[in-house]
Amino acid sequence: MVWYSDLPARRGRQILGDAWLVAWSALWIWAAFRVHDLVMNLAGPGLEVAERGADLAESIDAAGDTVAGIPLVGEAVAAPFGQMSDAAMALSEAGQTAADAVSVLARFLAIALAVLGIMSFAVVWVPIRVIFIRRATAARRFIDANEDLDLFALRAMARQPLHVLARISHDPAGAWRRGDQQVIDALAALELHDEGLRPPARTP
């Protein structure tokens, strides 16, 4: 598989683009963690309420157990303590629910920020790289013989602008039919250049 161009300038741009994609992704992942931490600060009050409510319910239960031990009137006096304990637990659960909601929001915002930030560059760069890799890899398989250069020369005549072909020969098709190696090599080099490859040396 061909990952990078044979041409130094194009290869340099590809390496720079890949490095920038990695750095860009790392930047947005860091920003996502920062947003997550900032949003999670909003969960502090809810967690505090949940913790204090649970402690209060435990204290009320302990007091109710103590009062329930009083002979004759203990059970009647302890009844309100149970209700207060239930109210404290409901308050604790409400605080925990609020904290959980903030946690879900923090995760959603962090993931959304990271994905959107990374995709803002990846959606452009990754398809460019995938197309190059597929085309260059396929082209590489076809340049292992002299006849393959003839194929790329034929493709060049079909795809390259006429003014570009005219710089190589006033009659490129005729030169190709005659087997003019110099013209064929020049035409093949044009097509391979577009694929990011260098033509191989002709074998005798």
Image (cartoon, rainbow, N blue to C red):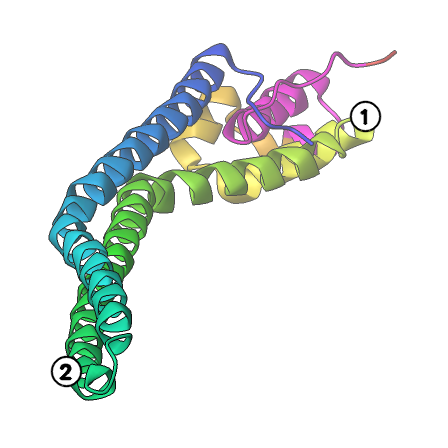
Residue with the mark numbered 1: 144
Residue 57, how many percent across, how many down? Answer: 22, 66
Residue 158, how many percent across, how many down? Answer: 55, 44
Residue with the mark numbered 2: 80
Q: Which residues are magenta?
A: 175-202
Cα–Cα gap, marks 1 and 2: 92 Å
Amino acid type, residue under disc 2 in the picture: Pro
Q: Magenta region's main secondary structure?
A: helix
For disc 1, the neighbor class at 10 Å (few under 14, some 14 to 19, many from 20) is some
Q: Residue at x 66, y 24 (%)?
A: 184
As drawn, 98 above or below 136: below
Secondary element type, mark 2: helix
Amino acid type, residue under disc 1 in the picture: Asp
- Is residue 19 in the magenta section? no
Residue 154, how many percent across, how many down? Answer: 65, 38
Left or right of 202? Residue 137 is left
- In this view, the residue in front, 160 or 119, is 119
Left or right of 181? Residue 79 is left
Secondary element type, mark 1: loop
- Is residue 190 in the magenta section? yes
Nearer the observer: mark 1 or 2; the answer is: 2
Q: Residue at x 17, y 82 (%)?
A: 83
